[in-house]
Image: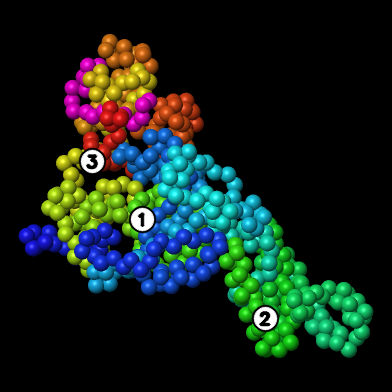
């Protein structure tokens, strides 16, 4: 490193560096249902002492057609809709999590590999439903040594936060009242009648129960039936029926002022809300404290049983540690869908929801697009010094940093840094035209040559790339030329050269049609078929007038899929 200029030497965080000492005390720990409980405690300890946690996911598939993968011409919106589709379609089977620390240029790793399977252990139809799988993905997983028998029979199940809430309602277990909100100081006549009625019931029940110790067994049983008294374990209890959440609060207020030996529990209704308030009679202050500890332990056991693997996700979220991912959009749409709640319909809601759970996400592939900006970002946010050698070639080639929550690898997180490589150019979506219906076997070069001879707009600079075998995208670098071409294709006075290729079936449309395809989920194997469906739907066309989305993309002639080379 001494031969390099001083500005080339940098001290910054990296997960891959030759000058970092890597602790090899830990091999990857395989975690299944059998060793999950003990491994969870170990993971919790390693996470608490770590600086970062890296995650990687393995699913049963990704994208069933080439155009369904995020493309260089995708906006943030279309990229999100594609990722959303894949996250909801394919099943997560493996979740790798690796807490790691950096101390004095020493990298210490604690990798865990959690094997998952969405088993319906609560017999409630959750979380398992059905999912798709791609044979190529399953074959690849098998070749890499993935044990499908262990996954199916011993994989760890889980429920999302939304599913957990629904499950608790359906289970209907009593829960301790977490808080009592004071109702308005002015009670209505109905409120007063309700409070006095339940207060009288509780008073007589409590007095009657204490007197049962002197009665014989038969009389004691009859008294319990008349007083509607039950048992909560070894302690007597009774239920107070309620018709509204206000009555719940009135009952809790009354019981709070009534006696220290009464413990109120909330009985949830099957359809949501509260069915009743259960009153448990304890024998002393010590017995009350013991009962409350029993309730807490019971709730923790139930939570572990219901949440399953999601406890790992909750631990990572609660730690507030930066989460490192190689592809944040694909990974976190899956994490949101599987462990939080169903994915929102638009990217803004998704980002807002995700950031409330994981406020710090670092995307390695995006950060490494721009080495200098990555250094600045990491130094300002999560600086841990490590010597790393950066070649001058890297500094010249990668000159911007991307937002870890964005799928756009060219989006800068620093407003003062907006530099692109020689092959990257900013272009408005209005300058893009999609073409399909051309002859089978036509390459991008052949299509560009054909277009060049068909109309005057192609005398200016333009670019053509195949999106898949059925559809191509044309980029016009001069304003208004795209609309001129679209008008010419649909005009009755079409020129002879263009008329010939249009008569053979060529169709053209703007970026809004493609945006509509992704928004409405018209995921056909061929993009051409999806574009046809979007144009045929009159409701979609009316919707287009009110839709808004990011209008700019970054076009690289090198990064676009070129089917001529396949």
Residue nearer the viewer, 539 or 283? 283
Residue identifier under label 2: 291
Residue at 75 percent of width and 76 percent of height: 233
Residue nearer the viewer, 152 or 15? 152
Q: Provide the secondary structure element on which disc 3 rests.
A: strand
Residue at 93 percent of width and 79 percent of height: 218
Question: Please, is residue 98 above or below residue 449 in the view?
Answer: below
Question: Please, is residue 241 above or below residue 148 in the view?
Answer: below
Measure the C-alpha gap from mark 1 to mark 3: 26 Å
Q: How is the image coloured?
A: rainbow
Measure the C-alpha gap from mark 3 to mark 2: 66 Å
Question: Please, is residue 420 above or below residue 37 in the view?
Answer: above
Q: Provide the secondary structure element on which disc 1 rests.
A: strand
**Dot 3 crowding, Cα within 10 Å, few <14, some 14–19, many 20+:** few
Residue 84 appears at what percent x and percent y?
A: 45, 45
- Dot 2 or dot 1, earlier in sequence: 2
The region drawn magenta spans 452-470
Residue 409 appears at what percent x and percent y?
A: 29, 47
Judge left or right: residue 420 versus residue 301: left
Residue identifier under label 3: 426
């Amino acid at each position: 490193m001494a031969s390099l200029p001083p500005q080339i030497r940098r001290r910054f965080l990296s997960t891959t560096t030759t000058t970092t000492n890597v602790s090899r005390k830990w091999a990857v720990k395989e975690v299944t249902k059998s060793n999950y409980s003990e491994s969870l405690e170990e993971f919790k300890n390693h996470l608490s002492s770590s600086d970062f946690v890296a995650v990687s996911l393995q699913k049963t598939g990704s994208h069933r057609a080439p155009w369904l993968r995020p493309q260089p011409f995708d906006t943030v919106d279309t990229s999100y809709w594609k990722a959303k589709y894949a996250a909801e379609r394919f099943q997560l089977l493996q979740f790798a999590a690796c807490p790691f620390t950096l101390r004095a240029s020493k990298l210490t790793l604690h990798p865990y590999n959690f094997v998952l399977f969405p088993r319906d252990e609560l017999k409630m139809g959750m979380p398992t439903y059905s999912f798709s799988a791609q044979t190529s993905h399953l074959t690849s997983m098998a070749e890499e040594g993935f044990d499908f028998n262990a996954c199916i029979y011993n994989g760890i199940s889980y429920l999302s936060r939304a599913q957990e809430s629904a499950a608790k309602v359906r289970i209907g277990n009593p829960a301790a009242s977490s808080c009592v909100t004071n109702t308005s100081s002015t009670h209505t006549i109905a409120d007063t009648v309700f409070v006095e009625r339940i207060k009288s019931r509780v008073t007589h029940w409590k007095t009657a129960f204490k007197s049962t110790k002197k009665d014989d067994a038969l009389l004691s049983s009859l008294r319990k039936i008349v007083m509607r008294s039950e048992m909560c374990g070894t302690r007597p209890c009774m239920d107070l029926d309620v018709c509204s959440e206000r009555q719940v609060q009135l009952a809790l207020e009354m019981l709070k002022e009534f006696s220290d030996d009464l413990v109120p529990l909330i009985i949830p209704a099957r359809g949501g809300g509260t069915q009743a308030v259960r009153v448990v009679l304890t024998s002393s202050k010590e017995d009350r404290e013991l009962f409350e500890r029993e309730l807490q332990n019971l709730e923790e056991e139930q939570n572990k049983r219901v949440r399953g693997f999601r406890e790992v996700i909750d631990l990572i979220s609660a730690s507030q540690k930066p989460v490192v991912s190689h592809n944040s959009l694909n990974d976190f749409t899956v994490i949101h869908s599987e462990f939080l709640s169903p994915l929102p319909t638009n990217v803004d809601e998704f980002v807002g929801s995700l950031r409330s759970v994981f406020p710090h996400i670092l995307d390695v592939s995006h950060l490494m697009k721009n080495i200098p900006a990555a250094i600045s970002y990491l130094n300002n946010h999560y600086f841990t010094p490590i010597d790393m050698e950066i070649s001058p070639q890297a500094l010249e080639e990668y000159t911007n940093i991307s937002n870890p929550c964005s799928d756009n690898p060219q989006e800068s997180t620093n407003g003062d840094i907006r530099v692109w490589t020689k092959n990257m150019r900013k272009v408005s979506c209005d300058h893009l035209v999609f073409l399909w219906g051309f002859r089978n076997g036509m390459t991008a070069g052949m299509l560009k040559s054909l277009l060049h001879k068909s109309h005057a707009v192609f005398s200016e600079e333009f670019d053509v790339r195949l999106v898949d075998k059925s559809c191509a995208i044309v980029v016009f670098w001069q304003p208004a030329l795209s609309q001129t071409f679209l008008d010419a294709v649909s005009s009755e006075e079409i020129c002879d050269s263009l008329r010939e290729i249009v008569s053979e079936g060529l169709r053209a449309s703007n970026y809004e049609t493609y945006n509509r395809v992704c928004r409405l989920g018209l995921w056909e194997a061929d993009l051409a078929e999806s574009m046809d469906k979007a144009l045929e739907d009159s409701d979609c066309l009316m919707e287009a007038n009110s839709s808004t989305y990011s209008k700019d993309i970054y076009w690289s002639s090198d990064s676009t899929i070129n089917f001529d080379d396949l």
